[in-house]
Image (cartoon, rainbow, N blue to C red):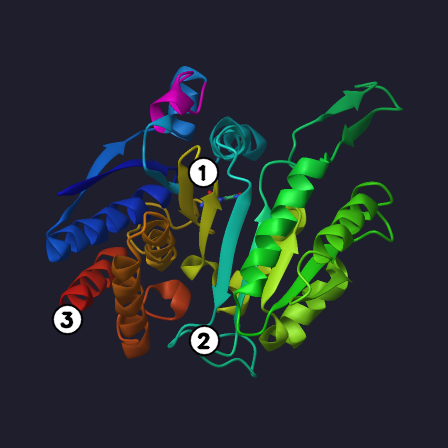
Amino acid sequence: MKQFDLHLIPGDGIGTEVVAAGRRVLHRLELLHGGISFRFRVHDWGCERYLKKGAMMPAEGLGILADGDAILLGAVGFPGVPDHVSLRGLLLPIRQEFDQYVNLRPVRMLPGLRSPLKSASAGGIDFVVIRENTEGEYCGQGRFEKEGTEEEAAVQEARFSRRGTERIFRYAFARAADRKRPRLISATKSNALNYSMVFWDRIFEEVKERFPSVEARSVHVDALAALLVLQPQSLEVVVASNLFGDILTDLGAALLGGIGVSPSANLNPERRFPSMFEPVHGSAPDIAGKGVADPIGTFWSIVLMLEHLNLAAEGARLMAAIESVLRRGDTLTPDLGGTATTAQVTDRVVAALGEE
Ligand code: GGG
């Protein structure tokens, strides 16, 4: 029996509901396979803990996670704790300290999803955003100046190292080279950001030299946002900085008809540290506790996790189950136009797993 140690951080709001659903799906996969077992260690880290103890996770939190095979996270953030405190107290330290420098976010139109774009059809939109995940605009450096005076100001720094920039491009080019249409677009804004994005473009051109089979170009992020809406079918791989990737992938999720289905993987490709998997959506306090959160984003993130754990067949099995439930379309949560609960969608996916 091969055992996988999984750390679960349900976090805040609907995070607890979708991770509980994910656990059921993993348990079902375990039973169907017969030769694997998932050992779950659940951590009650998040905003509630912050309000009681003054920290989102314990001081030794990263040490606790370090020995796991992977981390599954629900969502972070809740009213009562400022968002920058919750994000910087849990999500960002894990990504940064575990050097999860690739944030991989597929944008794929699955059967049954209803895109707000008239031209979108299942399979028509199928690209992946590779977001730099450890530095850039989210490096956390900056300062307040002359606070409380007429001249007060805030300075937010964006740090792009050669090492960090080169490695994200290498990863993105390698992914693009593997696609049927080997195409890569780098999101830039070097007309306005005269240090960081000029540097970003320079390194992009250097790395491009090493991948002659990939058709690669830079596009300003504002024009790229328009391209996502007007010609998403033309896209294969997009590589972006931390902030640009964050924004573009919410737009990408919206192209699929709602943010609830979109998955993400925070990867340490060298596997020196555990990687973390999480739906793109946040904690959605407005629907938290109502039992109607869409668990599909978490299930799809689990597919990415299974692939990372070299359980590709299990990943494919889960993806097929998700697609069959979406295709039938009679058990969908309200964000996708249905009336089903999280538990009902999970029941359906669990049942579909057994039908393969
Ligand atoms: N599912 C993870 C989550 O809570 N995301 C909310 C969020 O604001 N994420 C920002 C980010 O991905 O950098």
Instruction: Kindly identify the residue that appears in the image at 39 percent across and 21 percent down.
Output: 63
**Residue where numbered disc 3 is placed:** 355
Residue 43 x %, y %: 31, 29
Magenta residue check for 56: yes
Q: Which of marks 1 and 3 is nearer the N terminus?
A: 1
- Going by the numbered disc 2, the residue's amino acid type is Arg
Q: Earlier in the sequence, mark 2 or mark 3?
A: 2
Instruction: Kindly identify the residue that appears in the image at 17 percent across and 71 percent down.
Output: 356
User: Could you tell whether 300 is left or right of 106 in the image?
Assistant: left
Q: Nearer the viewer, residue 117 or 164?
A: 164
Distance of mark 1 from mark 3, alpha carbons? Answer: 34 Å
Q: Which of 27 and 76 is in front in this view?
A: 27
Rendered image: mark on residue 59: none
- Going by the numbered disc 3, the residue's amino acid type is Glu
**Residue where numbered disc 2 is placed:** 114
- Going by the numbered disc 1, the residue's amino acid type is Val
- SS label for mark 2: loop
Residue 6 x %, y %: 28, 37
Instruction: Kindly identify the residue that appears in the image at 52 percent across and 34 percent down.
Output: 99
Q: How many labels does the image show?
A: 3
- Whether the residue carrying mark 1 lies under 8 Å from ligand 1 is answered with yes
Q: Give the range drawn in magenta.
A: 55-65
The crowding category of the residue bearing disc 3, from other C-alpha atoms within 10 Å (few below 14, some 14 to 19, many at least 20), is few
* Above or below: residue 345 compared with residue 200: below
**Residue where numbered disc 1 is placed:** 76
Magenta residue check for 79: no
* Quarter-of-image position of residue 158: top right
- SS label for mark 3: helix
Please state which of the two labelled residues, at mark 2 or mark 3, is closer to the viewer.
Answer: 3
Q: Earlier in the sequence, mark 1 or mark 2?
A: 1
